[in-house]
Image: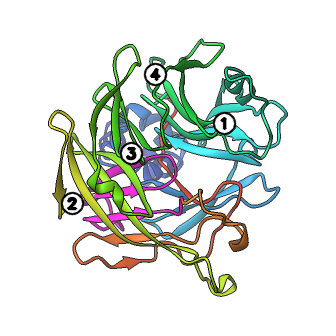
Amino acid sequence: MADWAELPNDLISHIANRVKVIEDFIAFRSVCTSWRIAAIKDDFDVFSPQIPLLMLGAKHEDDFRELYSLSKNKVSRLFLPEVRNAECFPTEGWLCTVSNTSRDGEMNLLHPFSRTQIQLPSLKILLAFHDFDHRPTVQYVIKAVLSANPSITSDYVLMLWYNAHDGGGGLAFWRPGYLNWTHIKAPRLTSVASMIYHKGKYYYICYGGRFYNLCSNFKPHLLVTLHDLFYQHPVQFYLVEVSGALLLVTRFYNIDEDEVDFANGGRSVETYKFEVCELDVTKGELKEIKNLGDSTIFVGRNEASCIDSSKFTGIKPNHIYFTDDWFDFDREQEGGVGRDMGAYNLEDGKIESIYPELSISLICPPTWISPSFIM
């Protein structure tokens, strides 16, 4: 019988170069010491989009989080005491965590697979700009979006959209080395529906239909107001980059506040369709897209992402995989957020289940996280 540990290093490296899924690459390197030495991280394309893992809802007083792999139909447990009783905002393979229990509202950037943390100025410091006191259990941070992956570069920005006590909201950003949040003077807005860093600029869209970008000095610039689309309610919006184009994904809900049997899986909020449009930021026009080809979009709390499904197994093309992120509606009666999940077929409008069990949480509901290395 051949000794696999004695394979030539150049052959092992060549095989490792053909592995496209980061989970498989990690498993490949764990076979034995010689494979781990030969298959270095440089053999893996760290810039290639990965299948997001479904991080299941947080359980009360639990230091572990469960991750569900769509391609392997398998749940694994990850020791993550850093996210206990914390809200999690996935962005660029990291989590922006906001503590619900600490006195000052501790905030960090956390790499969930290495447990590397980057300390951020606290929520208390963020709100001090408005002379507001931080109140534990109140949700302030709504969006947290990185411009780049901190695993790859130290030249990045973390942009926040947050709510204040007066019913308004604000934009603020942080760079590595800063001791405080830098606040951005922005028009008084309805809540930001989605935010993205696209081709060197931040873009965000509000529920009222106003679409902005942030110039080089982070000054908001109104690009266009999309009135017609935003008369339909209730809806949720996502900005996502697909093959270099900026797309606007619209998610349509039904809401049933009466006589919902939650004990038997009933849902007060239920997605029934999606629409996808390409957004021309110069002309301020929307062009509906009926077919994504091999592209697959993932939407959920805080961000949306896209992969080429032809490079992976177990992922369906021309589908939109979605998690439950309707937070504005009171979900305590349901036991938490997380019932409204599935995969939407853009061709025939059918919705399929993506996870066989119920996963709900009032602290941190199921959300997508993208596997990545620490370089």
- The kind of secondary structure element at disc 4 is loop
Calculate the distance from the C-alpha at mark 4 to the C-alpha at mark 2.
30 Å
Sequence-first tag of 3 and 2:
3
- Residue depicted at x 36% and y 68%: 314
**Residue ID for mark 4:** 156
Query: In front: mark 1 or mark 3?
Result: 1
38 lies left or right of 284: right
Q: Which mark is residue 166?
A: 1
**Residue ID for mark 3:** 7
The x, y position of residue 293, in whole percent, is: 18, 61
Q: Image quadrant of residue 125?
A: top right
**Residue ID for mark 2:** 294
Between 277 and 328, the residue placed more toward the observer is: 328
Calculate the distance from the C-alpha at mark 1 to the C-alpha at mark 4.
30 Å
Mark 2: amino acid: Asp
- Residue depicted at x 83% and y 36%: 102
Query: In front: mark 2 or mark 1?
Result: 1
Q: What span is colored magenta in the figure?
A: 296-325
Q: Badge 1 local density, few (<14 within 10 Å), some, or many (20+)?
A: few
Mark 4: amino acid: Tyr
Calculate the distance from the C-alpha at mark 2 to the C-alpha at mark 1.
45 Å
Q: Image quadrant of residue 128?
A: top right
